[in-house]
Amino acid sequence: MTGPGESIYRALLYLYPRAFRARYEDDLVAFFLADRAHPKYGAGPLRPIRFWTATLRDLVRAVWRARTGRDTDDPRPATARAGVGRPRWPIRADLRAAWRGMRATPGVVLSAVVLLALGIGIGTAMFSVVDAVVLRGLPFDEPDRLVQVSESNLDGADAWPAAWPNYAAWRTRQSVFSGMAASAYAGWLTTAGDEEPARLRAVRLTASIFDVLRVAPALGRPFTPADEVEGAAPVMILSDGVWRRRFGADPDIVGRVQRFEGGARTIVGVMPRGFTYPLGSVAASAIDVWVPIVPTARDRARDGGRTYAFTVVARLRAGVGLDQARVEMQGIRGSLATEFPKWFEDRGVMVRPMTAAIIKPEVRAWMLFLLGAVGVVLLVACLNVANLLLARAIARGREVAVRAALGASRWDLTRAFVTDGLLLAALGAAGGILIALWGVEVLRATLPDSLPRLASIAVDRRVLFTAAAAALATGVVFGLLPAIWLTRPNLSDGLRAGGRTVALAAGGRRARTGFVVAQVALATLLLAGAALFAASFARVVRVDLGFDPEGVVVVGMTPRPAPGAPRLDLAASRAMVLDALDRVRVVPGVQAATVIGAGTPLGGGGMTQPLDVPGPSPVRFTGPDEPWVHGATAAYLETMGATLVAGRWILETDTAAAPPVAVISDEAARRYFAGVDPLGAIIRLNDRDVRTVVGVVHGTRHVGPEEALRPEVFVPFAQGDQPSGDIVVRAAGDPMAVVPAVQAAIRAAVPNATLYQAETMEDAFARLTAQRRFNMLVLGLFGVLAVLIAAVGVYGLMAYVVSQRTREIGVRVALGAAPSGILRLVLGRASRVLVAGVVAGLAGALLLERFVRSFLFEARPHDPGVYAVVTVLLLAAGLLAAAAPARRAARVDPLHALRAE
Amino acid sequence: MSPRPPAPSPDLTPITFEVLLSLIDGPQHGYGIKLDIEARTAGEISLGSGTLYQAIQRLEREGLIAATRAAAGSGDPRRGRSYKLLPAGRAAMQAHLRRLSRVVDYARARRLLPESRS
């Protein structure tokens, strides 16, 4: 019978040299079993620990002695020891030899180190991103106990924020969580007072969040239930960032009152540095202040409208699993559904780990995809190093043979190659870490802001450990590969071949050819990926937005009454905006200006309204058929560069007093009037706003280039129900240059206006396509790098082949072969290698294409154009790399070549 | 110049010497050797399996001891192979002892050790 202890010990015996284990294994095990009864290990629970400590200490020492030849038991100098001759692993001597070898071929070594450093550096930088975004845990205590509780549709497919009454009911009825908390975006708080108004991004929190997340302010106090009562004094907690930027890190900030439009708030605390909540897609630095949620009677009531706005987080009670929590929450939903059937006819409840709720599967997939791509780059770099080591090994074939003949063991020879590989890898890793430190900065600046936890990306110990491990593995594996078959027992062949190392060379050439084919294949794969992404990006950029974003800038504004004056009514507010527009139009450099109400294109906001087409058979359009409704002025077409398709555009004469009109988009005409001329037709917006259609305009992609066209209705700003709008300007030259003058003009018309950060339409477009641009750039970079490395590989291989066959080529030339024939011979061989690699790479790319298709915009399966371009590029690069060795071969002087033997 | 102490045997290390000593009275298996050495040195030298069998390996290679099938005393196969002292091993041990004895005589003469034989 074999106990577990014996099995472990037997396994450990594999650490000994094979000969020793073969002879003494049974004896050692017998010793081990007998020793377990030895009285010196004492009694009690510590006995096995003492026994194993002693056993392992002996094992480690004995293995060390056996492996290094350093016998501490033996007083003689190492060289005098029987059967050893000298230390088993003379590290310093090996390193010296490897360094000497490298200095002999500095160019080749340098290129290998640089390529390896690039591979490791880029790989490490990318890993640090992936690690920070998806791999690392949430920055809270016991993050795996945190769950997000959401409302969902009945089949549990989509998660939505919760309605307040439901959250309140969950919280009082549940018993599986130690705490539950809610949060909701509160938009912007605009400061009031003497200084220039500033906007602070605010989030509303329940007081319970501090217990659930187990966080506390660095200064001051958290929110308390007393802050959540209607009528309580308004308070807020600052983020570390805003405390430093805006309040100069004032240590006595607690208790200060900050005035905002709509009331003042007392600062009661400052959160610690690095804290942010929620962790969702909003950039980590964006939240400035937190304010308590003060539910109103309307929020709490179950009779009024249903507002779903609250993100709910909870901490599982100790000993409660996720499944148990799910069961209980389903039960609570069931009893709520019988009490308030209207609220739950279409609503379920969902409990997810918080990590899964924050790091959405598509982000995770994207990150892992990037990691995979960078892994391929690293692999190509490793193959290149292996190739180099192999070439050097072959060049040293005779030396190897001589050393073997003089009694060097296989272990001695293997060690030399592994030391070579490790030294290269260490140099590569050192360079790679430098590149990683720099690359992380670049990536952080290039990655789209919407990536969760972007701010926490950094090269830390974990990342450096990964880089070191990658380098170590590279060195050992690719040092071992040439060693394994170069030191096969028939080494004396190298001597017998009169120094031409024919036997080694044949196997070496095959292996090198294999490596180069693999490099070309992987480069093809990456380049094909890059081409797919580039084609996808090109399709996105070419999407017809329905307007011309170039030269257009959006200047956001909200009119405000003078201090002490009454609230602005709709007409007064609108008049102020139109007055500001009149002044903006005459600012030098402004070509055209318009007001757009309810969200500008690409701006991320907008308003849809249900639309009815009255008549004998009225039709109502809701849901996805609801149109965007924009307010606009007469200059809209000119400012945005939009095109009128039929009828007329909004005129200056379409005032509040004039008959209500609307211009609809061609998409709206298609959906609502299907082939019938819409001009003169009547539409009703939002059940009350009846208008006559007077024109049809080319539709715009309001949300972004990847969004499907949605119907739109434009109404004269002067006739709509929107009190304000953004001023949009088309400028000659750089649109940002006119912004200060435009803002001054607005302020001259409306002294108390709140002005927002201006953004050009082109910047908005870049923001919307940031992820695609990033993917394209990264994969393009990887592809180019891989092709470069593969080209170096092809060059090296062909140079080697030519040098090996110099004599044969000399004979051919002597027999009358033309230089062009020699050129064809060499290039033909290069083509075979290239074609093999490209075919393998294309096959791989076609197979893997479906995994990346979800990242592509309107992907065409197996796009032949893309693959053709990739094939041509790689063949061209490879043949270019082979050209120099081929020309050298064509110029071989037969006399010289034959004499060289 | 004062007389120098003779160098220890170039062939035997403290551990291999102890192993040879344990085989004087007849063949022993590995664990028996270990216990014997522990008893003789009052626990000062307590060998682990690796250390012991590396010593045994060296002694076997140098032809000083050999494995024997005829286990002395306990015929328990679970105790592992037994080893017996070869004539060359006995000679090496005696040479080593002579050298040690010279060292001891030298040390006594210089009053580095107490006289124990009286």
Image (cartoon, coloured by chain):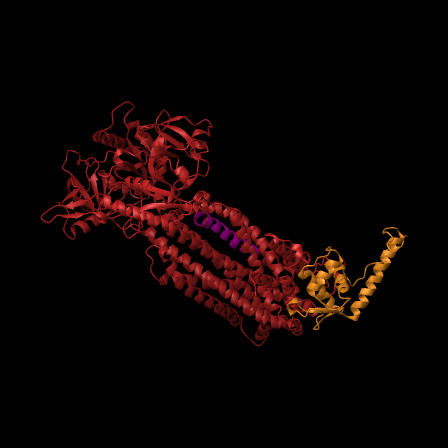
Chain colours: A red, B orange
User: Which is nearer the eye, A389 or A761?
Assistant: A389
Q: Residue at coordinates 32% horizontally, 56% vertically from top-left? A: A858
Give left or right: position of A727 versus A76: left
In this view, which residue lies farthest toward the left? Answer: A616
Report the residue that reaches farthest toward the top.
A564
Whether residue A127 appears in magenta in the rendering, the answer is: yes
* Residue B79 magenta-highlighted: no
Q: Quadrant of residue A783?
A: bottom left
Q: Is residue A67 above or below residue A592?
A: below
Q: Quadrant of the N terminus of chain A?
A: bottom right
Give the magenta part as a residue range.
Answer: A111-134
Q: Nearer the viewer, residue A411 or A246?
A: A411
Q: Position of residue B29 (x, y in %)?
A: 70, 67
Q: Is residue A473 above or below residue A405?
A: above
Relative horizontal placement of residue A814, taking residue A134 as reference (left or right): right
Q: Name the residue rendered at 49%, 53% in the picture.
A: A123
Quarter of the image containing the C terminus of chain A? bottom right
Location of residue A844 (image quadrant) = bottom left
A775 sits left or right of A158 in the view? right
**Can residue B107 be seen in this snapshot?**
yes
Q: Residue A819's quadrant in the figure?
A: bottom right
Position of A32 with respect to A881 (left or right) is right
Q: Residue A665 at x, y = what percent?
A: 21, 47
- The residue lying toward the viewer, choosing from B112 and A488, is B112
